[in-house]
Image (tube, rainbow, N blue to C red):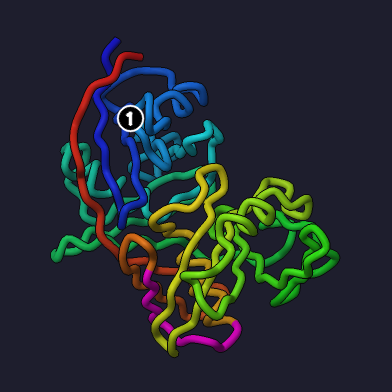
């Protein structure tokens, strides 16, 4: 069968989006691996699946596969593309859309200027919720990486994140240290790793090594995790503007127990069909 898809991106973090509300198919991990290959497939960081909800209080169900075939809980840049997709495809006329994900329910708000604000929900800090192997919750942890002591903050934005503060994001060891922290045994479900440079009270520079995808042009949940870390430590003040390789995201957070609000763009690249 031929399956219609849309290629989209949020600040260069790119996605293949498939509507399984009006189409019917069984997508498996092997399909994500095949289609995600940038030489022999479509090529993407994540595959986004739009499904009818199983919860009557939400509008859609949203599933996410990394290019390596692993299914993950959350993707902030993908959430903005999801909102743009369901409006463009006339799957909904709502400008405020509630979506069920593996990591919980999120709310998407499509603004009049085309920017999309995502209510990512409150961050979670307890080690068992991240998950992270630690005796107790702490603002900063130290892990051993091949004999090197690495200090990081750990939290969940519906998916696990480690945030490392660096002096210079451009020259940070993203491609060497990133995969070692991703697979560190203290993170039983692996982890996304952010390298944050604080420029001033409102501006920062961020690079992210994403679990199952490598370094991406942008990571929405990674930006949320970095902003929460910076605000929690008193390094920065909300709202925070973070410059990623693909562009800028604005993150607002009022403190513990309150939701993280992420605002940024989403763009359609092309439409296509692929044989399943």
Task: Name the quarter where the C terminus is drawn.
Answer: top left
Query: 50 or 65: nearer the eye?
Result: 65
71 relative position to 94: left or right: right
Residue 145 vertical position relative to residue 271 in the rendered view, above or below: below
Residue 183 vertical position relative to residue 202 in the rendered view, above or below: above
Query: 56 or 215: nearer the eye?
Result: 215
Image quarter of residue 193: bottom right
Q: Is residue 36 magenta?
A: no
Q: Tell me the crowding category of disc 1: few under 14, some 14 to 19, or many 20 or more residues within 10 angstroms, Cα based.
A: some
Residue depicted at 46% across the width and 70% down the height? 170
Residue depicted at 66% across the width and 66% down the height? 154
Measuring from the top left, give residue 166's x and y in whole percent: 57, 76
Image quarter of residue 51: top left
The residue that disc 1 covers is 42
Measuring from the top left, give residue 264's x and y in whole percent: 29, 64
The rendered magenta stretch, by its main secondary structure, is classed as: loop
Residue depicted at 40% across the width and 58% down the height? 218
Image quarter of residue 175: bottom right
Query: 104 or 239: nearer the eye?
Result: 239
249 relative position to 142: left or right: left
Q: Which residues are magenta?
A: 233-243
Residue 189 vertical position relative to residue 53 in the rendered view, above or below: below
**Residue at the limit of the structure toward the top, as seen here:** 1
Q: Is residue 241 magenta?
A: yes
9 relative position to 157: left or right: left
Residue depicted at 43% across the width and 74% down the height? 205
Measuring from the top left, give residue 127's x and y in whole percent: 73, 61
Secondary structure of residue under mark 1: loop
């Amino acid at each position: 069968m031929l399956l219609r898809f849309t290629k989209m991106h949020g600040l260069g973090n790119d996605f293949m989006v498939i509507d399984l509300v009006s189409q019917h198919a069984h997508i498996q991990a092997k399909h994500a691996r095949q289609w995600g290959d940038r030489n022999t497939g479509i090529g993407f960081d994540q595959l986004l699946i739009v499904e009818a909800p199983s919860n009557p209080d939400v509008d859609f169900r949203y599933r996410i596969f990394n290019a390596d075939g692993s299914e993950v809980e959350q993707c902030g840049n993908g959430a903005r593309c999801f909102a743009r997709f369901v409006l463009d495809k006339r799957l909904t006329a709502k400008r405020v859309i509630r979506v069920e994900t593996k990591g919980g329910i999120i709310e998407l708000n499509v603004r009049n200027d085309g920017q999309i604000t995502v209510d990512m929900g409150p961050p979670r800090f307890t080690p068992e919720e991240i998950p992270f192997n630690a005796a107790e919750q702490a603002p900063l942890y130290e892990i051993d990486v091949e004999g090197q002591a690495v200090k990081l903050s750990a939290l969940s934005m519906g998916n696990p994140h480690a945030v490392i503060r660096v002096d210079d994001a451009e020259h940070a060891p993203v491609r060497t240290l990133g995969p070692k922290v991703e697979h560190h045994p203290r993170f039983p479900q692996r982890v996304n790793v952010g390298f944050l440079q604080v420029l001033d009270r409102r501006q920062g520079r961020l690079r992210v090594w994403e679990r199952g995808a490598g370094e991406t042009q942008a990571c929405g949940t990674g930006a949320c995790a970095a902003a929460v870390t910076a605000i929690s430590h008193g390094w920065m003040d909300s709202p925070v503007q973070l410059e990623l390789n693909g562009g800028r995201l604005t993150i607002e957070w009022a403190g513990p127990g309150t939701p993280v609000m992420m605002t940024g763009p989403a763009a359609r690249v092309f439409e296509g069909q692929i044989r399943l």
